[in-house]
Image (cartoon, coloured by chain):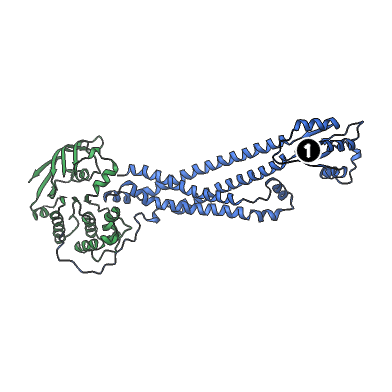
Amino acid sequence: MDLGTERPQVPAKARNLSPIVPRASIAGRALVAVVAIMTFLASITTGTVLLVSASASEWQSEVASEITIQVRPVAGRDLDRDAAAATQAIRTQPGIVEVRPFTKEESAKLLEPWLGTGLSLDDLPVPRVIVARVQPGSKLDLAELRRAVTQVAPTASVDDHRAWIERMRSMTGATLFAGIGILALVIVATIISVSFATRGAMAANRPIVEVLHFVGAGDRYIANRFLRHFLRLGLQGGVIGGGVAMLGFGFSESIAGWFSGTPVGDQFAALLGTFTLRPSGYLALAAQAVLIAAITAWASRRTLFATLNDID
Amino acid sequence: MVRFENVGLRYGLGPEILRDLNFQIPAHSFQFLTGPSGAGKTSLLKLLFLSLRPTRGLVNLFGHDVSLLGKDEIADLRKRIGIVLQDFRLLDHMTTYENVALPFRVMGREESSYRKEVIDLLKWVGLGERMDALPPILSGGEKQRAAIARAVISRPHLLLADEPTGNVDPTLGRRLLRLFIELNKSGTAVIIATHDITLMDQYDARRLVLHQGRLHIYE
């Protein structure tokens, strides 16, 4: 094309510097805050579920590796002799690695928190406790053990803690179920928030979308211009929310240390152990933050294409 | 290049504003589209630009029946069409240079491959000193020239211009007409919708006159 010779000679410094979709036109800060809060809540939920599951399985394996035998006192029988006979009978059972009968004094110590010190067990019908440790992985014949013990000590009862283990299992299951429920709600809330934010951004930038259509841009090209912003916002929110949650778990051990020795601290320690998330737990939280950023981008992309179909 | 057969257009349930349009736009041709206000010139341009679909009839563009095209195919066809609208449609957050370079950017071309071309064209339309200015501070005439430059920069196969000289003085109007003529000589079919009799008298070209929804052609 010949444009003639009447061209004013002006030094040019023009360059393509502006993004096609201006970043300021997207209500980014609010969306980052929403994604950060959602990621934080999801991370706290997941972290707590992981902690409870880990402590429960630890506790469960400890409890499962022990059996407790109680020898109750009845008139006409010598409790000490029955306890010693039961101890001997347990020792002969295959799979038992250690048997520890509690003495009269130790039994009194166990009851101290409820009955106070200076207790004389002779005045009370307190059963004698024998704790036996089972070899991990071995199959203990509980019926045979029970038969052998009651043969020598008819007032003895054997407890393999099955009821406790079942309760622990159902508690862990309930915690996991609640955690998954909360995660699902957080993800749905994130998708809804991101869809609204995307729709708002598209409405604010409708003139840009129309011009891009005029110059021959396809929907995929236009969607990608917006998507970059939303992916960045999602990642920012994910890193902030996930990072704060990880820091929280990182410092939880120190925080738990401040409360150790107090009744609350001791109860927590008994329930959740050391309150420390394993390295795999931190990896799970990081993966979750990336997942939420990806969900943000996906929800945004879905809304973008739906909105672009309405604009032409 | 463009073929209309018995094309009619109505908005919603309103009356038919374009009726029984039968015409062809050959490649490399130049024509003015004229008619009184409200005759449907802008609607016809929108049909040609595929931003409106006809209510009836056949529109064939570059060998494609437009009623069978999907969104992606329409986007591809639009890359071969340049359009100048009355309201300019410049992007306010981009400089004049960036607005004019936008079609190349959308095509995914490297800036170094078109920078000189964009600058030359901006100088030609008298915007050499306004390359780094944002549209909100441009005058109406400057915006119009920027919009024209954006429409012609990629040397489209078909150029549609809606009142392209409406906001400029007669001297610049002649200059812009010369730009359209040069573009036509280099192979672009041009359709200029205008009321401006003086502009049409400056160049002997085919005239498409819209009157009461019907098209009359004066070769």
Q: Position of residue B34 (x, y in %)?
A: 13, 47
| Of A272 and B82, the residue lying toward us | A272
The N terminus of chain A, quarter of image: bottom left
From this view, report whether residue B76 is shown above or below residue B182.
Answer: above
In this rendering, position of residue A42 left or right of residue B38: right
Nearer to us in this view, B37 or A295: A295
Q: Position of residue A130 (x, y in %)?
A: 82, 39
Residue B109 is left or right of residue A185, and the answer is left
Q: Give residue A209's position: percent from left, percent from top.
A: 32, 49
Visible residue check, residue A259? yes
Task: Provide the letter of the chain coloured green.
Answer: B
Residue B183 in the image: above or below residue B47: below
| Residue at the image point whose x is 28% and y is 62% from the top | B112
Name the residue: 24% across, 49% down: B79
Q: Is residue B124 above or below residue A167?
A: below
Residue type at numbered disc 1:
Thr
Crowding at dot 1, Cα within 10 Å, few <14 / some 14-19 / many 20+, comes out as some
* Residue position marked by numbered label 1 in the rendering: A68
Q: Please name the color used to draw chain A.
A: blue
Specify the quadrant that holds the C terminus of chain A: top left
Helix, strand or loop at label 1? It is strand
Subunit of label 1: A
